[in-house]
Image (tube, grey):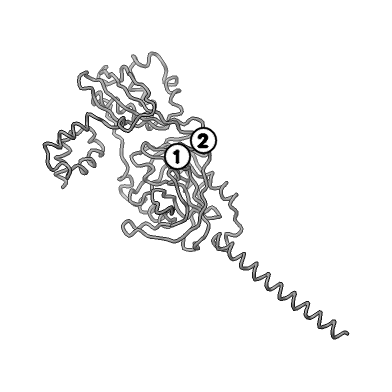
Amino acid sequence: MKKFLKMLLLIFIAGVIAYTANETSRLSKRIQKIENKLGGTKKIGCNEKDTVEKVRRSVVRVVGGEGEGSGFAIQKGGYILTNFHVIDFEPSPKIILPDNTFETGDVIMADKDADLAVIKVKKDLPALSFAPIGGMISTEEVLAIGYPLGGSLSGESAVLRGAFSRRAKDKKNGVQYLLTDITMVGGISGGPMVNICGEVVGINTSGLLLGGMGIAISSDSIIEQCSKMLASKQPLKDVQITIFDSNKDALEAVRSFYNYLKIRKLEKAFGLLSDNFVMGYSFEQWAWGYRPLLDTTIVIIKPDKEIANRIHVKLSTKDLVDDEIVYKFFEGYWDVRQIDGKWLLWKPRIREIKDPDKDWFMDQDFIKEVEEFAKTHEDFEKYAPEMHKISEQPGNENLTLQELYDKAKENK
């Protein structure tokens, strides 16, 4: 009897051991799957909720004249990283901070080919740390954080979840990319892509999409390219520079006025207004109405063909109302006078345009001029791209078609 009980006990113990070993194996496999999803043993203690809360404190909205996107703090002292295509044509982008206030930022270095730019603001945001991508595991969870759809979607930064797939390198510019299964949308460009612990593994680049696959510039390439920009003798070679020559003529006075508004140099803009327009109002009273102004972009500006010193303009503006960006469009003219040797804006007639169509953004007179020019220059199409490129260079805004054509031929 004792032998029988002993045998039963041994069988029971063996069963418990086998069961425990089986459950341990199953649990180990489950833990391994979780580790693989999160990116390894070190990341298993991190959780998404804490990570998102931490990262959001460092993510900003970046508003330029031509584009909008996201950015994030990379260094103490107000240094923000974003994509170059977000701030293209904009040397002084507006940075909307997590507390919904905004500042005018200064682009301090940029690289168009690498699609990276660094902006300086006064506000000191908590900087995110970078993680080398050598230890990333395929299928590891990553989070893309930013402001999708730009100003048309208000609220806090959004979180897009996905998995890392593989790395790929562009042989032309030497930039390494992370390929993920995240479907990115416009506006999230420039925001951070982080691992589960909130370490930056890349910068979202929504302009590079392939069948729903989201692509980010890797953290390794970010560090490498920023070092190159920092060591460059011309870190701003790709950034368009705004030239102010308000005392040249009536046209440049109006252009300078709106460009000062664009970069929020309101005192400078106010200084170009005549007493006839100001009518005794102080700068503070006048500037009050421009508190929410994020951007002013000149769409078309040109002198009147018949009335001297009358300058026609078409404008687009962006205002920050609560946490939403409101877009408006205006057209009209300014009469400008020279007073005591200084060109001043005398009297405007500007009205708001609701829902302009695509033709509104085009200078019909210029289109006709180009058509006539093309009739007398058989090789116009050959030089047209170079002419357009030259026209966008600072100081070339007022060149005639013939002057642009001649310069284009010289460059060829």
Q: Is residue 30 above or below residue 390?
A: below
Where's residue 209, x and y in %?
40, 51
Q: Which mark is on residue 165?
A: none
Q: Amino acid at mark 1?
A: Gly
Q: Is residue 104 above or below residue 72?
A: above
Where's residue 349, x and y in %?
33, 18
Instruction: Identify the residue position indicated by label 1 in the image.
Output: 150
> How many other residues sit within 10 Å of disc 1, few (<14), some (14-19) or many (≥20)?
many
Closest to the observer, 70 or 247: 70
Q: Can residue 33 be seen in this snapshot?
A: yes
Q: Using residue 12 as the reference point, say whether residue 293 is left or right of it.
A: left
Q: Can residue 79 be seen in this snapshot?
A: no
Where's residue 4, x and y in %?
84, 84
Q: Using residue 232 as the reference point, say whether residue 70 is left or right of it.
A: right
Q: Amino acid at mark 2?
A: Asn
Q: Using residue 385 as the reference point, say whether residue 345 is left or right of it.
A: right
Nearer the N terminus, badge 2 or badge 1?
Answer: 2
Q: Using residue 343 as the reference point, say whether residue 326 is left or right of it.
A: right
Residue sitting at x 35%, y 22%: 271
Where's residue 214, x and y in %?
44, 53
Q: Residue furthest right?
A: 1
Q: Secondary structure at mark 2?
A: loop
Q: Secondary structure at mark 1?
A: helix
> How many other residues sit within 10 Å of disc 2, few (<14), some (14-19) or many (≥20)?
some
Closest to the observer, 181 or 192: 181
Closest to the observer, 225 or 209: 209
Instruction: Identify the residue position indicated by label 2 in the image.
Output: 100
| The N terminus: image quadrant | bottom right
Distance (Cα) linking label 2 and label 1: 14 Å
Residue sitting at x 42%, y 38%: 63
